[in-house]
Image: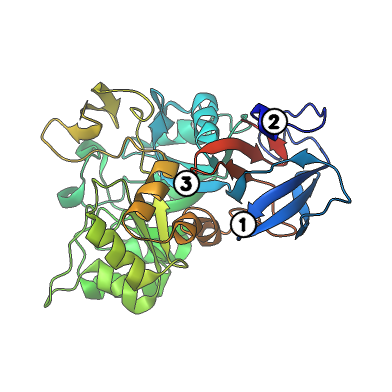
Amino acid sequence: MFPAKYKSGTRNLRLWGYRTAFRKAIDMILKNLLFEGKLTDITIENGSITAIAPASADTTGEDCTGLSVIPGLVDMHTHGCVGKDTMDGEFAEMSAFLAENGTTAWLPTTMTQSYEAIKKVTEGDRNVKGAQILGFHMEGPYINAKKKGAQNGKYIKNPDLAEFQSLDGMRVVTIAPELEGSMEFIKECGALVCIGHTDADYDTCIRAIEAGANCLTHTFNAMPGIHHREPGPIPAALAKNIYVQAITDGLHLHPAIVMMLYKMFGTERMVIISDAMRATGLGDGIYEFGGQDIEVKNGVARTMDGAIAGSTSTLWRCVKQAASFGIPFEDAVRMATRTPADMIGEPKKGRIEVGADADLVLLDENREIVRVMIAGSFYK
């Protein structure tokens, strides 16, 4: 519940998780929130925002004096947390942890594993309390072995359109466009295609983008960098104005590179992701990740041969890190809310406007999370 100074009224507020199975219509007005620099009242009905107005003494509701509000975060690339992995196909504990840390919607992201293992993930129960599951992101096995990173090379193969289309709920797929059959796959797969774990040159990436690819997966990581005679995927993304994902935990990318991407792609094309793995929310140790042992030491996850293996940061921490690098806080928030929602085709997520889902994060004066609302009900 609210700290004592924020309490008002006697409503009993509960979360009823995923919108298609658990939503409960609760009408309320959140009063005196700081939104876009102004004191604001936000009216919520049946899980949606129905009015946004200057704060008024003429209405009653939940008094949020001293709190600011941002949209719920949307993580379109994350593998696990609190000892759980998306490959387990059990999402309840992960969704709960994500919600507590400001992420209100997410795409569980699979690893390079067997078809049977990936299919098991898509058959898991998505109707869980906490962060809403919007579908899945398949990262591999259609990748380049030279740039596999922490992915399991045993299962890497060329794109298989029939196989992919037999998997339920795949919203995003990461592929290496230089692989045989990639261009046809990009055109026909029916999902958002991201270029990643790739050794493709500039011309190949341009062709992939023209075929329909619209994003780079964890930009700079597991792909060629920028060379003045061999520009590679990143200048191709800039030339074609597609989206780029960035892990802004301070480890995967130097702060100067984060700022460079921000200045190149802006808030409407740069997406902050966590790429978190099961050690997130826990401590150092040995963890399983994609069928391989991963060592987490001082918060850094690496394979046994030294490759970086995902992050141990929440998306909220990545947002605050990006802001600490020099990106305006409001822009960092945008890149973890509205921009990923727009990219994956969720027009009611990641924004505070009339008609949007009431997924909100309430912050104190130190930008620490006080309350999280999902589908019009408070979770935290």
* Residue type, mark 3 in image: Asp
Q: Is residue 230 above or below residue 302?
A: below
Q: Is residue 169 above or below residue 201?
A: above
Give how far apart the Cα atoms at labels 1 and 3 are: 14 Å
Tell whether label 3 touches label 1 (CB within 8 Å). Answer: no
Residue under label 1, please give it: 351
Residue under label 2, please give it: 15
Q: Position of residue 28 (x, y in %)?
A: 81, 42
Mark positioned earlier in the residue sequence (1 or 2): 2
Could you tell me which secondary element the residue under label 3 belongs to? strand
Give how far apart the Cα atoms at labels 2 and 3 are: 20 Å
Q: Is residue 300 above or below residue 147?
A: above
Q: Quadrant of the N terminus?
A: top right
**Residue displayed at 25% across by 56% down:** 255
Could you tell me which secondary element the residue under label 1 belongs to? loop
Relative to 143, 31 lies left or right: right
Q: Position of residue 225 (x, y in %)?
A: 17, 63
**Residue displayed at 29% across by 56% down:** 196
Q: Position of residue 125 (x, y in %)?
A: 58, 29
Tell whether label 2 touches label 1 (CB within 8 Å). Answer: no
Residue under label 3, please give it: 75
